[in-house]
Amino acid sequence: MPESEQKLIHTFSALADIGQEVAHKYNFHEMIRTSFHLLLGSLAIMRGGIARYSRFGHELNFLAVRGLGDDFPVSASIDPADEREFLTAGMSAIEASQAKMLIFFQRYQPFVEKRGIELIIPMIVHDELVGLVMLGEKASGEPFNSADRAIVQAMARHIGVGIYQRNLLAELERKAEQNRRLYEEMRLTYADTVKSFAAAIDYKDKYTEGHSVRVGKYSELIAKSLGWSDERVEGVAVAGYLHDVGKLTVEKRIINSPTRINAKESAELSKHPVVGYDILLPIHHPYTDVPLAAKYHHERLDGRGYPDGLKDDQIPYIAKIVNLADSFDAMTTNRPYKARRPAHEVIEDLQRNSGKQFAPELVTAMFEGMLDELEGGSEDKSFRRLLGREYMEAEGIIPMLRNALNGINATGPLTLVASE
Ligand SMILES: [Fe+2]
C-alpha cells in the first residue's frame, strides 16, 4: 500500500477515535486530553496545547499541553479584537508568522516563539469561539503541508464540538440550578404567606388562639401517619392552616362571643367555609384541593354537615382530614363556654363518631400517630407539644388507644347513618 494511502487510513482512524471520545467520554477533561494526544499522534507532532475559551472572562484556559515547558501559562487573556480576528479566520489554521498582528500573540510572544509554535487553530462552532489549538513542529521536521492542515483542522473541529457540547450542558445545569433556587424561594414565600394568613385568622379569634396553626399541624400528622409523600403532606398542612380563612370576613364580635351565639349569628358564622373557598380559589396553590378543604371542612360523612350536606364519597378527602383535625382541636382546647375535654373522652368521642362524622381510616391514622409518639417509635413529638405532656400521657391512654384501634378496625367497611 502506498505511503499516502496508509497515512490517509491512519488519519481516518484517528479522526474516528476522536469522534468516539467526544461522543462517549463522560469525563470532559479526560476526553480533551485523549483527543489532543490523538491529534498530536496523527501527525507525530512534538508539542502543543489545547485551550478552552471563556467568552465571559475573555480567557483561554489550557486543558492539555505537551512539551511546552512548566512555565507556559495555564491561562491567557484574549482581546475582543483578537476574538473577532479568529472568528473571521474561521477554523483555518493560522501560521505563527501570520499571527504576529494578534494582540494575543504579541502578549505571549516569548512563550509562543520559544516553544516553536507553528500553527494556531481557532475552534469555532456555531459562530462561537470555543477554544484554540496550538501546534509545534512535526517530529519529521517537515513543515505542515495543506493536507496536514486539513487533518488537524478536522480533528480540532471534532474537539471543538465536544467543548461546545460541554458549554451547553454547563449552561443548562446553571439554568436548572437557577430554576431550582427560584422554585425553592417561591415555595418558601408561599409557605410564609400561608403562615401569616393563619396567624391573621388566629389573631382575630382570641379564644381559639393558634387554632389554625394547630389544625395545620394535626392535618400534617394525620397525612404523615397515612404514609403520604412529603409533598402531599405539605399540601394537607397548608389546607389545615387556611381552612378558616373565611372567618376573616365574619364580624369579630361573633367570633369572639364569650357565650353561645344565637341562630342569626350562627348563620353568619356558617358562611365561612364558602367565603374561604372564594378567597382561596383564585390563588395558584402548588397543591391541589386547598380551596376545597376550606369549603368542605364542616361536612360530615353521614351528610349532616354543612354547607352542602355532602356524604362520604362526595366529600373531598383533604376536607375529611381537616375536619378531623379541626374537631380534634376544638375538643382539646379550652373555649370560653367549654373547658377542654379529657383525653379519654376525646378518644371515645372520635371512636364513636368514626363512620358518622369522621372517616374511620383517618381516626385510625391519628390514633396510630399518637401511639407511635407515646411508645417512642416516632421522633416527632408534636402531639405532646401541642396538647401538653400531662394531657398526652394521662393514665391509661396507651391501652385505650389500642382498644379504640381494634374497635374501629373491627367494624369493617363504613356504614352510613341516615341523616334524614
Ligand atoms: Fe371552620
Image: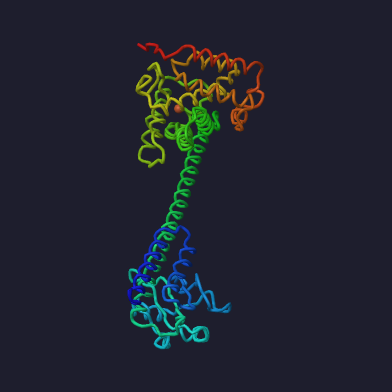
The correct choice, above or below, for 14 with respect to 277 in the image is below
Q: Which residue sits at x=52%, y=86%?
A: 114
Q: Quadrant of residue 156?
A: bottom left
Ligand 1, by image quadrant, is top left
On the rendered structure, is 183 left or right of 371?
A: left
Q: Residue furthest front?
A: 1
Residue 359 x, y percent position in the rendering: 44, 20
Q: Quadrant of residue 393?
A: top right
Residue 414 x, y percent position in the rendering: 42, 15
On the rendered structure, is 205 left or right of 123?
A: right
Q: Quadrant of the N terminus?
A: bottom left
Look at the image and name its color scheme.
Answer: rainbow
| Number of marks present in the image shown | 0
The front one of 398 and 329 is 398
The front one of 219 and 305 is 219
Q: Quadrant of residue 417?
A: top left
The front one of 62 and 271 is 62
The correct choice, above or below, for 257 with respect to 25 in the image is above
Q: Quadrant of the C terminus?
A: top left
Residue 49 x, y percent position in the rendering: 48, 75
Residue 418 x, y percent position in the rendering: 37, 11
Q: Which residue sits at x=53%, y=25%?
A: 329
The correct choice, above or below, for 56 with respect to 261 in the image is below
